[in-house]
Image (spheres, rainbow, N blue to C red):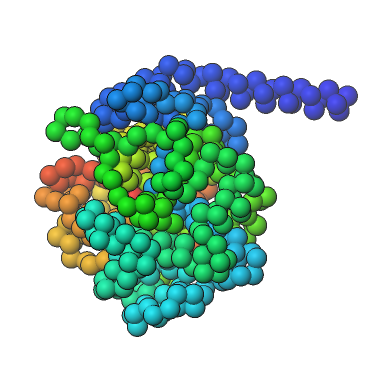
Amino acid sequence: MKYFIFLFCILIASFSTAYSQKSIPNQLIDSVISKHMDEKHIPGLTLAVIKNGQVIKKSSYGVSNIEYNIPVTDNTVFEIASMTKQITCAAILLLQEDGKLSVHDLLSKYLSNLPLTWRDITLEQLMNHTSGLRDDWDEPTSYFFRNNTDEKMLDAQKQMPLFFKPGEGFNYSSGPFFLGLVIEKITGRNYSYFLKDRIFKPLEMSSTCVYDSTSLTNNLATGYHWNNNKYEIGIDIPSAAEARADVGILTTIDDMIKWNNALNDNNFLKVESKQAMFTAGKLKTGIVIPYGYGWYIYYYRNKVLFEHGGAFRTGFNSRITKIPETGLDIIVLCNKWKSDLSDLTYQLASYYDKTFKKISEVKKEKSKADYKTKGIENLFHDLSIKKYNRGQLYQQINISGFDPDELEDLLRGFKKTVLLGKVFLKSNPRQLFGTSITEVFYYKIEADKPSYWSFAYNANGKLICANLED
């Protein structure tokens, strides 16, 4: 009897899963993707939607090469740019598990002749962007042709002043480039060989590699820009820059599914390592930042998200988003720079999780705005005039990984905030940044270009984080 009850439960669960998947027509998802590709001029794209470890949607669209009309397939290889950072951080965690290093080690333990201002930089600060280093990818392409070896790129960065003292601010940087140099120093092997032996082979990611101009696969997509109403092939950069540990990985959608699934179990990384990877970092003041080891950590649509994108001047864009509360993971790879994949990802998520409905579609809150609204208005006015520098910003507010320049541009012409709605979570608070989030307020920010934001508070009414929603 117990056996039949057990079998019945399995059949019901299978039916429910199948029904849930059937309830989202493939043609609807395909039309959303096609529309986005048309609007953003994306030649080719591939994606996977994963629910509780099962692939429920995997499709390829468009072409990997316009000139030869080569279609995108599961075997098409894309450059994933900054999504490389999470894999490099995983490599550091593997070395920590081996007892070869600690994330709390100083960078100067492994690299010599560093500037005095770098003496307190730790490996962890390189992993979570609290080192104070700049992102040299903000430099023009000519910078990389002048500095066309690891040694020259390292020396060039040594000449750049830090934005702030290590551990005193958050600024997205090229820190994992230095982690690649540390891996080579410790192992005595090339960064690419270490990743192949310890990550790609064990996870059977057979189509994944670090960029190498001497052995590029025939399946590599061509990267593009859209300029002056036409496609242009992505910008060429020196091989040393393209192979760095902060940007250098090439892969396929099938291999990214394997990577994603490896992060969902405890066979690849130990529980402690995986927990550390997805734990938001802290400044020396104790203030929490929206980044772990190679992952942004956000509060979005009443859910905690782990995600990261990659945008490369060589003509590629990529994104991975994990929503642990619902077991939903979405991976998108494409061959056009600046393709707004976050918009596409969240739109897709809204079909698999109805709470992802666009905030811009929510009607204005009828209830009167309270003191929180005035506080938000004052804060966003200050952000719109760039009152805070990169070292000060995250002392004020934990905000979606933006820097002051981006916020100044986004909020230019700031006028006022309009309360759209509130969500109360006291009966089921979300845990994020070391506290319980019990209230979320949604606002429209009226400026030259309107934007939509959420603001999360704890039970004491303290603002924990702000996130750009639409």
Find residue 404 and report its horizontal and vertical position in percent.
23, 60
Quarter occupied by residue 245: bottom left
Decide if residue 367 is in sight here.
no
Is residue 25 toward the left or the right of residue 378 in the image? right
- The vertical placement of 273 against 211, above or below, is below
Find residue 108 and report its horizontal and vertical position in percent.
45, 78
Question: Image point 18% across, 65% down: which residue?
Answer: 387
Quarter occupied by residue 336: top left
In front: 302, or 292? 292
Is residue 89 toward the left or the right of residue 220 in the image? right
| Marker count (numbered) | 0
- The vertical placement of 432 against 351, above or below, is below
The C terminus sits in image quarter:
top left
Decide if residue 316 is in sight here.
yes
Q: Residue furthest front?
A: 214
In front: 329, or 444? 329
Question: Image point 19% across, 42% down: which residue?
Answer: 450
Find residue 8 and report its horizontal and vertical position in percent.
76, 22
Q: Residue furthest bottom?
A: 116
Question: Image point 48% across, 53% down: which residue?
Answer: 86
- The vertical placement of 50 against 131, above or below, is above
The N terminus sits in image quarter:
top right
Find residue 353 and report its horizontal and vertical position in percent.
47, 33
Question: Image point 61% across, 25% down: which residue?
Answer: 17
